[in-house]
Image (tube, grey):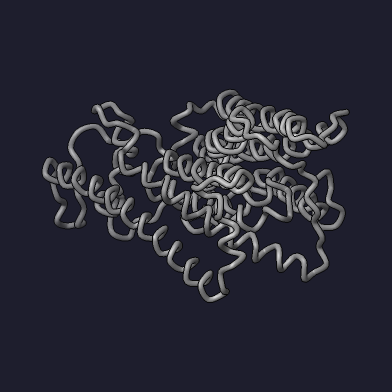
Amino acid sequence: MKSLIGNSRELRGASFALVSAAAGVILMRIFVYFLPIDTSTYGYSLLRDALFSLPTQLLFFAAVPFLIYKYYDKRTALEVLEYSNIGSFGKDKKGEKPFRAYYLLAIPLGLCVFVVTVGVSSSWMQLLRLTGYKYVSSSPDMPEKFNFGFMFAEIVMTAILPAVCEEFCMRGGVLTSSRKVFKTVGAIVFCGVAFGLFHQNVRQVFYTALFGALAAYMTIRLRSIFPAMLMHFANNFASVFISYATNYGWAVGGGFYAMFDTMPVWAMFLLFIAVVSVGVGIVIVMLYFKDKRVMEKKIETVKDSAFDVTNKRVVLFGEYDPQKISDLEMEKEVYGADYEEDKYKPTARDMMIAIACGVTTFLTTVFTYVWGFFY
């Protein structure tokens, strides 16, 4: 009964965190929409973006969810990040470092994701236009002279804060809670859809959902939130950098978008396949290093254990530690070959807040398609 109550409370806490993110986006967009700021110049447009991004990221994606997890769920940061483990094998009790060198491969992976995102986003926009959707950007031109301060501010708002705050909210508490209900595929799909909808922008919903699913997959398989953070940062940083490089004609990145304008369709398709292949290769390499490390630890553990011949199970010596068994991915070896992780079956009361949040974000996304609601 205690476990069921804990799971129920945890799910509702995750639902409250989703409400914080969704409501924060809506409230802050309404707030900045009515601010008496002349956004015809780039600096003031950037100021309005800051007045939206800083409170949204720091307050609604990070601070409020953290307080919910701490005081409502009564969970520590490590418990919140259980399925996005920032430390492994006893949470560094044996000197293990939570950050692995191969996590840095998530940076080039993020660059591959950016290139793929450009293609997916362009295709999605073409599909929307076929349905009659029209979008005219109201963003002012960048200053004639490059301003490093403006670029740095955009990097902070667009790359650094989302990589930390959004990942803590979505691939942290929400992913952990969803894994208590869904199996791996279900949790990945749920986190992808949730991430896409909470952007509440029809132009972004499709590729952000795909990104959210990939980030959830990486977090679950690598047992760390750091790769998702680095991939998120690299993807968003590339977007900012390429925009400035294009505007100011920099040698590096300045011709990125122009390249697509002159490239035939078959060449773009081959480029897309090549970039996807590189990205998949990077993921495979990261998983190889992770599995190799886990296998080494698993072998050490098995050598110090006994074997139950009758039940064909490994018997670990010492104090029972389910977290260690999970970190070593030894559930089937310890519990038996037919082991399946128990999943909590949520009640209607457990899910009604999350469902209401999903419906609300879906409707606001539809509003951006029909009316351009506060965009």
Residue placed at 18% from the left, 46% from the top? 296
* Foreground pick, 27 / 374: 374
Can see residue 180? no
| Rendering coords of residue 350 (x, y %) | 65, 43
* Foreground pick, 230 / 83: 230
Left or right: residue 94 versus residue 156 is: left
Left or right: residue 200 versus residue 123 is: right
* Foreground pick, 47 / 362: 47
Quadrant of res 336? bottom left
Quadrant of res 210? bottom right
Residue placed at 71% from the left, 67% from the top? 126
* Foreground pick, 338 / 164: 164
Residue placed at 82% from the left, 37% from the top? 40
Can see residue 125? yes
| Rendering coords of residue 326 (x, y %) | 33, 44
| Rendering coords of residue 179 (x, y %) | 49, 48
Quadrant of res 56? top right
Looking at the image, residue 112 lies above or below residue 177: below
Residue placed at 64% from the left, 36% from the top? 17
Quarter of the picture containing the C terminus is top right
